[in-house]
Amino acid sequence: MFKKPIIISLGCSFSDATFKSHLTNIPEEERGGWPIWSDHIKNKLEIQHKTKYWIIHFGKSGSGNEYALKHITECFAKYKDRIKFVLWGGTEFHRYYHELSGRNFNLTGDIRAYPSHATVRARKFLDHEPHWGNSHQKMQEANVYMAINYAGHKSGVERLIHHGLQLYWTALMLCQKYNATLLVTQLLSPIYTLETLKPNFKRILEDSTNSPNKTPIDYKIDRPWEIRKGMKSPFFKDLHEHRNHFFNLRFVHIKDYITPPFKEVDHWTDYIRKGDNAGKGYRKKYLIRPHDKDTTDNYNNRNQYGQNLQVDTHPNAAGHKNIADQLWKHYEANFL
């Protein structure tokens, strides 16, 4: 009996085939339910190779690269060389998966997306390392503590970079072992510049009755510094040698990011903001509901999860097709 070759699709909400926008003030058909970028790649591969593939979706909203690698290893253990393509929408290195609870967490998520909530929690425990419990809330509180005291400093960022490259390296080695093609498209910034997070950090620190930071947050961590640290990782050499498997990842495509003038665009959301034809009209074309004059990021206009009730910057149907078109051009140039 013929068994279809397998494509596995992984990533965060940008790669979640079941994703629905949290917005309720838009038509239902604009909230989700369309083919995602990996579905478009599957269709192109079927035409190119004249064969039918079985695509297995593991993309999950809020998840990180650890969660993706968990499913990559499990799939290879189960299906071996039936897996022909691994399509991975890379997300932030700050996210991690907690196996015991089965939950995904984001070290900077509370601070970047929900600063008002984080401020309330910060007052409670920034001067004291939080008590580690098994509840989701306790883990979120610990995230705020770790984000400020570790992700806000060079040593912590360096460890995040090392670990992020380790995850990609492990996937690359597995794909080589089983003769599968790994294609990673970096959809979110692997490391958010601390300058971007500065207003949120400042708000939390100023609202805290006692400053928790014995060491000030280093806001001068820039991309050239990050890349130089990444180049020192033992995983860098293999990733750089096989950089054709990675699209828009600054830690393997180093030349454009450490040689002036520095390339700014290095992931899809950056491309929407800064790339060719970027601008408000371009964002509206590819995002569900971007910021505009009428949808300012007002933290008083949020639901219980801290989500802006007027804005959703996930890709819409056209956005997913754009992600796929860009990755397919990269695939054609490097593999066909």
Image (cartoon, rainbow, N blue to C red):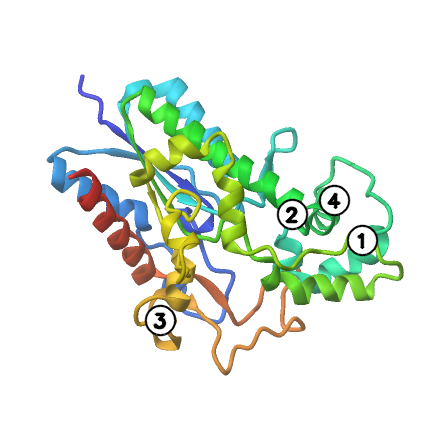
Q: Quadrant of the N terminus?
A: top left
Q: Is residue 281 visible?
A: yes
Mark 4 or mark 3, whichever is nearer to me: 3
State the residue in front, 244 or 236. 236
User: For the residue carrying disc 2, how many other residues have a C-alpha within 10 Å: few (<14), some (14-19), or many (20+)?
Assistant: some
- Taking the spot 41% from the left edge, 60% from the top edge, the residue there is 262
Q: Earlier in the sequence, mark 2 or mark 4?
A: 4
Mark 1 or mark 4, whichever is nearer to me: 1
- Taking the spot 63% from the left edge, 72% from the top edge, the residue there is 301
Q: Is residue 61 visible?
A: no
Looking at the rendered structure, the secondary structure element under dot 4 is helix
Residue identified by numbered label 1: 213
The single residue placed furthest to the front in the displayed view is 260
Mark 2 or mark 3, whichever is nearer to me: 2
Residue identified by numbered label 4: 142
- For badge 1, the amino acid type reads Asn
- Taking the spot 39% from the left edge, 59% from the top edge, the residue there is 263
